[in-house]
Amino acid sequence: AAAAASTASGVPVVATRRARRGFLDRAAHRFDRRTIDDTKAAFRVLTVFLPMPFFWALFDQSASRWIEQARHMNRVVLGVEVLPDQVPVVNPLLVMMFIPLFDRIVYPLTRRAGAAYSPLERMGWGMLLTTASFASAGAVQLWIEACQYPDPATGEPGGEQRADYPSILWQLPQYALITAGEIMLSITGLEFAYTQAPLSMKSLIMAFWQLTVAAGNLIVVIVASTSLLIPSSEFFLFAALMLTAFFVHTFIASRYKYRKESAAEADAHAKAVAAHTSKQRAPNAADVQVP
């Protein structure tokens, strides 16, 4: 409760209630204030990471289950047969095309429209694009299953081919969607994590970012080992999981308060970039010719 107090002039004032203390504040007798505040800031960033494993669970399947999907498609394009393992090369090609496109066109337009302005908003849009990519993959898989006879043992699709499979080009939309999602979620997420992490916690935050990748792979293993669904249903299941992660991310983002980078951190960041740039420009000792 508020307590009455008096100032030096004798005028009574009302003392405000003490700020609410968190469980980390109880360590103030062992650690300095800066360490405690940095730890709090790191925990806030880690909270944003909670939905990230679901993105990696979907993204990493573009180099596994989507290849298996390609095996059951018409892979002849302009008279040339495309091997299933060659299809994922579309992703890095699209990344190189999309990064300047997003940086110079998409982001400025969304900034003017007032949408996807903050990093967390961009990450949310990335989750929606990833959801759409697996919905597209599920639709293609339904088409493939419609071209197959039922398996005599299970009665489910997966038997002999009874109609022409769809062209491999129908996989391009799902690759384009997941690549756009990767740019808006993964690249933006790395930027967000590095800028929001205190100087003393940046390595820790980057380590937890890599941990979300491992957690995503674990989700795939669990679903694949326990699910009795046909491939198309599994694609839609992963899309539903990603959509659920989007709503969780939206809730977390609505409560997150951005942390301003301190002058010391900005200076350290600038020095790191300058050192990296000078290292790239420095001549290789093996390339220097001694007269």
Image (spheres, rainbow, N blue to C red):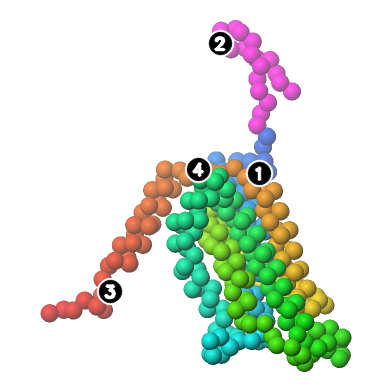
Whichever of callouts 2 and 3 sits on the residue coming sooner in the sequence is: 2
Q: Amino acid at mark 3?
A: Asn
Location of mark 1 (residue): 255
Gap in Å between the C-alphas at discs 2 and 4?
A: 36 Å
For the point 65% across and 75% down, the residue is: 61
Whichever of callouts 3 and 1 sits on the residue coming sooner in the sequence is: 1
Location of mark 2 (residue): 8
Q: Secondary structure at mark 1?
A: helix
> Where residue 238 sits: x, y (%)?
72, 68
> Where residue 119 sits: x, y (%)?
55, 51
For the point 50% across and 56% down, the residue is: 106
Q: Amino acid at mark 2?
A: Ala
Indicate yes or no whether the magenta region holds residue 273.
Answer: no
Q: Secondary structure at mark 3?
A: loop
Asked if residue 190 is positioned above or below residue 250 in the image, the reply reads below
- Few, some or many residues within 10 Å of mark 3 (<14, 14–19, 20+): few
Range drawn in magenta: 1-19
Q: Nearer the viewer, residue 259 or 171?
A: 171
Location of mark 4 (residue): 260
Location of mark 3 (residue): 284
Gap in Å between the C-alphas at discs 2 and 3?
A: 70 Å
Q: Quadrant of the N terminus?
A: top right
Whichever of callouts 4 and 1 sits on the residue coming sooner in the sequence is: 1
Gap in Å between the C-alphas at discs 4 and 1?
A: 16 Å
